[in-house]
Amino acid sequence: MSATDHPSDEDLIARIGRGDRGAFEALYRRRRADVYRFALFMSGSPAAADDATQDVFVELIHHAQRFRPGAAAAVPWLFGIARNHVRRQRQRHHRSVSIRDAQAGEARRFVVDDDPLAGLARREHIAALRHAVLDLPVNYREAIVLCDLHELSYADAAVALGCAIGTVRSRLHRGRALLASRLRADDEGLYPAPLKGTP
Amino acid sequence: MTCASIAADLIDLARGASPGPVLRAAVERHVRTCADCAARLDRERALSADMRRLAGDTPAPCVDRTRELELLAAFDEAWAQPASSRKLRLTAGGLVGAIAAVIAWAVVRTPTVVPPAAAIPRQANTSIVTPTVIEVMQPRAQKPVRQHAASVPPANTIDPGPFIVWPGADELPTFESGHLVRVHLPADIVESIGLAPAVDTAVVEADILVDQGGFARAVRLVP
């Protein structure tokens, strides 16, 4: 498959900056879910995530030229835009609707397991983890969502968050320690106990 | 190497974010001899595995063709504008803001309605001819800014050109009321907006429609 058949995100953004409607449509379809999931974990609300996703692509229409391919990859750049929109939403509304119960319901409806008890335990475990992630302070949650859920490198996450790589690493580690401590009550012994000096 | 000193590297190792071959080898060597760190590594790996499951378990957005069409319409609208307007919007946002702020300042200083532009003596050496302010009210039925700007009564003795929507004005709140402010603008800015000065000059005179919030909405050249 050639680069023309499957252009990179960076190529698509460059073409969007030149008014290529097809490139915009392609990037939207390729990255909409990523942006939505990031916004969902940061806002805690499907509706807010949907709005933020739309806002990200509207901003892309007007500011695609601001993207500098050598300075950042496309996905972290889009996440950075999404982060700003979610933060603005949070400032406007000060509260959000939880996705926890709704998503637990979705899982119950659509997941079928060979071992129902094990499946139930696993789903409850993942639901507890989601709950704990959503309860993290924003700075730690951003690092967890970008690095652990979206598997961005520290460098890419630093681009999205507009901070130093060391800051991302530190926030991620502290976030994981917080997660572990909050989950320990539910899953005794499964998650790491904090070392001395970690929260 | 102590347990505390490798704590962060242990997490990187568990996540698959390699800390580099040398450090990785050192951490693995330590883990082989330290039961606590070995157990901690296992727990961090379990957490990473659960995070991957959580990522896979997170729902994708509903496929909403309407929202996609809205975006494509916004794209078409944005690219239907003159290239010069887009360029100004993308590269000279600060300049536009500064001009709008200056205009707003001028409006605040001169809140009263004054006679049409032609009756006002021009001040060639000032960037804003502050006395030229005309009250403009938006009718109750909301109209697009472009239509409204075109409906501004022309001055009695001059025939000014058509109004052009000020770059970025489409995104502002609904126009309710405003003023016309006569200013001197650099010709290259005027050209980049899409207006063509009649004579080759560095500075041109223009009327700017300023809204209730002090933001520029439309501009036209003064003949």
Image: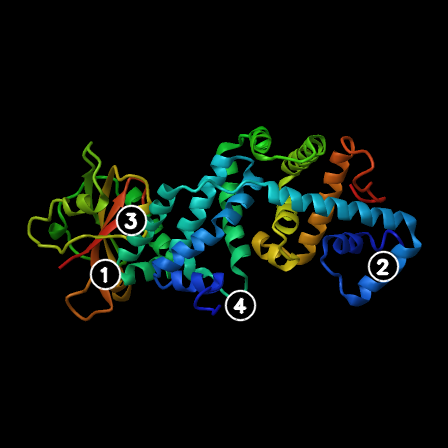
CA distance separating discs 3 and 4: 36 Å
Q: Which mark is residue B216?
A: 3
- Label 4 marks a residue whose chain is A
In contact (CB < 8 Å): disc 3 and disc 4: no
Mark 3 or 4, which is nearer the eye?
4
Rendering coords of residue A116 (x, y %) = 68, 31
Residue B1 visible at all: no
CA distance separating discs 1 and 3: 15 Å
CA distance separating discs 4 and 1: 33 Å
Residue B199 visible at all: yes
Mark 1 or 3, which is nearer the eye?
1
In contact (CB < 8 Å): disc 2 and disc 4: no
Question: Which callout, 2 or 3, points at the residue further toward the start of the chain?
Answer: 2
- The amino acid on which the numbered mark 3 sits, given as a three-letter code, is Ala
Mark 2 or 3, which is nearer the eye?
2
- Residue nearest the observer in this picture, B111 or A125: A125
**Mark 1 packing: few (<14 Cα in 10 Å), some, or many (20+)?**
some
Q: Assign the C terminus of chain A to one quadrant of the image.
A: top right
In the picture of the structure, the residue carrying the numbered disc 2 is: B28
Asked which secondary structure carries label 3, the reply is strand
Q: Which mark is residue A70?
A: 4
Asked which secondary structure carries label 1, the reply is loop
- The amino acid on which the numbered mark 2 sits, given as a three-letter code, is Glu
- Residue B155 to residue B90: above or below: above
- Residue B164 to residue B196: above or below: above
Rendering coords of residue A120 (x, y %) = 68, 31
Asked whether, in this view, residue B45 is left or right of residue B134, the answer is right
In the picture of the structure, the residue carrying the numbered disc 1 is: B194
- Residue B199 to residue A75: above or below: below
Question: Which callout, 1 or 3, points at the residue further toward the start of the chain?
Answer: 1
- Label 2 marks a residue whose chain is B
